[in-house]
Amino acid sequence: MATTVRSSTLTLPAAAVGAENPLPPLLPLDEAHSIPDAQRAELPPEMARQVGYEPLRSVLPARVLDGYSRERTATVLDTIVIENDRLRATVLPGLGGRVYSLHHKPTGRELLYTNPVLQPADFALNGAWFSGGIEWNIGATGHTTLSCAPVHAARVPAPDGGEMLRLWEWERLRDTPFQVDLWMPEGSDFLHVGVRIRNPHDRAVPVYWWSNIAVPEHERTRVLVPAEETWHFGYERSLRRIPVPHWRGADRSYPLRSDFPADYFYEVPRESRKWIASLDERGQGLVQTSTDLLRGRKLFVWGSGPGGRRWQQWLTESGTPGYAEIQAGLARTQLEHIPLEAGEEFAWLEAYGPLDADPDAVHGEDWHAAREQVSSRLEAALPRAEVEAAYAAWRPCADADPKGPPLATGSGWGALEVARGGHRLPGTPFTEDTLGPEQQPWLHLLTTGSLPDADLQDGVPPGPSLVSAAWRDQLECAPSGALTDYHLGVAQWHAGDHAQAVRSWERSCAAAESPWALRCLAFADAYDAATGLHPQRAADRALAALERVTEVRALAALVREAVPLLLAAGRSADARGALDRLPPAQRERGRFRLLDARVLIAEGDKEAARAVFAAGFEVDDLREGDEVLSDTWAALTDEPLPDAYEFRMRPA
């Protein structure tokens, strides 16, 4: 039985992802995955170059997804099921093409950690993300902006004559189209995954890729990889080379023997076969291997400490076993980006399947013997030469056109970029019929030289801004106007030309003063040291923007930004007034209750602020690594932080 592909559904308790934040994100959401320049200078030369190569300035042109809650209801999700006589994989095309489940039929084993709920949390580059399965992380350091977005999907011919599922999209942070082809050769216990990233431009682009595999985690779960050293990265933002598996008195190949969340990026020798496995007390579990281009391997652990345990509960439901992540990437670490030259592509093959090894060897004290046991069992199950042959057989299929109607439809941004650049991308059609309302103003700019007329004063936030050099050129050549200058300012800010951005937003306000351009000017006043910090002017502009908005989603986004600006300017009364603008339903959300506590502290009423904590609240979109809860609590008391608010990912 060769691979078959069919549409299906899956019902899960799920919290809706919600609407996008209408405000363009002018800065990255955080800098959790970065290291100081002095530490970068001490790294090996290739790693140092790639760590410093094209770091992300923001998640533009994507928008932030922070409109979800923690209220879950039974939700029917579209799936695509691919299977042969040995394996069944369930894919979520509406959620980044995530492989939700990989079921081994002969043994009845689920090879992945399958989350029993779909709970968005603030881990993706642009916010909403959920845990479990196999995700395809492309773009920049972190979880992809496509984590909770639809991708295109269709059937294509597989190398063995069966069917293959193709997923594809246009990755917008780096303007790189990519595809993921999934199939199972007849009689194989391994899911084969062909991946291709293309650069259709006339310049090099930075590329990032990590396949992220969630695996069940127990006391006797051990992660094995052909390495004797690893780069440890903790949330203290330090990167250090340490031995494998023992470090600081513990065997770190067991995920639960770390105290705090951490990344372990392994030094896999170039000549070694590339693989990583997670095996239980019986020596059973999942192994991932690939062709050599995908050189990096990583283990992420939540650790056994209270913060990591709390995050695990946050991402699923009580009583659910924990999970770890084993990963495979193009670079040695996830802090690095790799140049992809003009007109070139990266392509490789991955394979995922079950592994059974001798448990005494897997869990023995001899690390070399444990690795050799897994390596030999992998070679018996799926020889390295067979992976290379599968890759060679897949390559001619990578350009094959999809067969039949689409199984799922992604965004229209790829079609817009193809229209602008005239790109030819065999195998991944970005067709005109996918163009939607968000793309239409930009298509108008492309075909007429100007954006369509729009009133920035009508209270409706403008649509997404495009910020690439090509679109910035289009905006600079277009007739000046409130909307055009607003979008141009966003593109200039993203390019690092903050002074010109401010001038463009000032022209936009001169043409028609809008809350959207005022908000951008307030942001520049508050955060751009290069053009000068003006906290009082930032506060004034933030208030002026608030006075012009009544639409609830936009108002909530502006209040969330304005309150910290007002507190930084020492204007607690104005901060209180900003919160009071919110409708009661919004005001009761955890994010705003936390802001209320911070305003109470600024007003000198610590007793009332403690009462907010005592009453209990949940910040639905608490950011990975954010210590705002513990910091606010520390401003109130020296008492230990209550368990409900313990999300710290590093030593206190």
Image (spheres, rainbow, N blue to C red):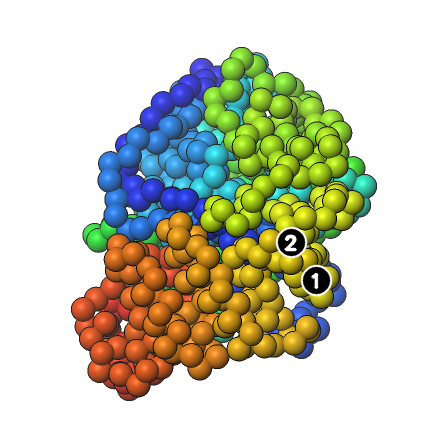
Neighbor class of circle 2 (other Cα within 10 Å; few <14, some 14-19, many 20+) is: some
- The residue positioned 56% from the left and 74% from the top of the image is 537
Residue 375 marker? none
Q: Position of residue 238 (x, y in %)?
A: 55, 72
Using the rendered view, name the quadrant where residue 403 is placed: top right
Check disc 2 and report the residue beneath it: 511
Say above or below: 7 vs 177: above
Say above or below: 5 vs 608: above
Q: Does residue 630 appear anywhere in the picture?
A: no
Q: Nearer the viewer's eye, disc 1 or disc 2? A: 2
Q: Nearer the viewer, residue 108 or 142?
A: 142
Q: Position of residue 17 (x, y in %)?
A: 38, 44
Q: Position of residue 630 (x, y in %)?
A: 34, 75
Mark 1: amino acid = Arg
Rounded to the nearest angstrom, the CA distance separating label 1 from label 2 is: 12 Å
Q: Nearer the viewer, residue 39 or 588?
A: 588
Quarter that holds the N terminus: top left
Question: Is residue 88 found left or right of 335 in the rendered image?
Answer: left
Q: Does residue 460 appear anywhere in the picture?
A: yes
- Label 1 secondary element: helix
Quarter that holds the C terminus: bottom left
Mark 2: amino acid = Ala
Check disc 1 and report the residue beneath it: 503
Question: Is residue 348 found left or right of 605 in the rendered image?
Answer: right
Q: Nearer the viewer, residue 287 or 588?
A: 588
Q: Nearer the viewer, residue 283 or 629?
A: 629
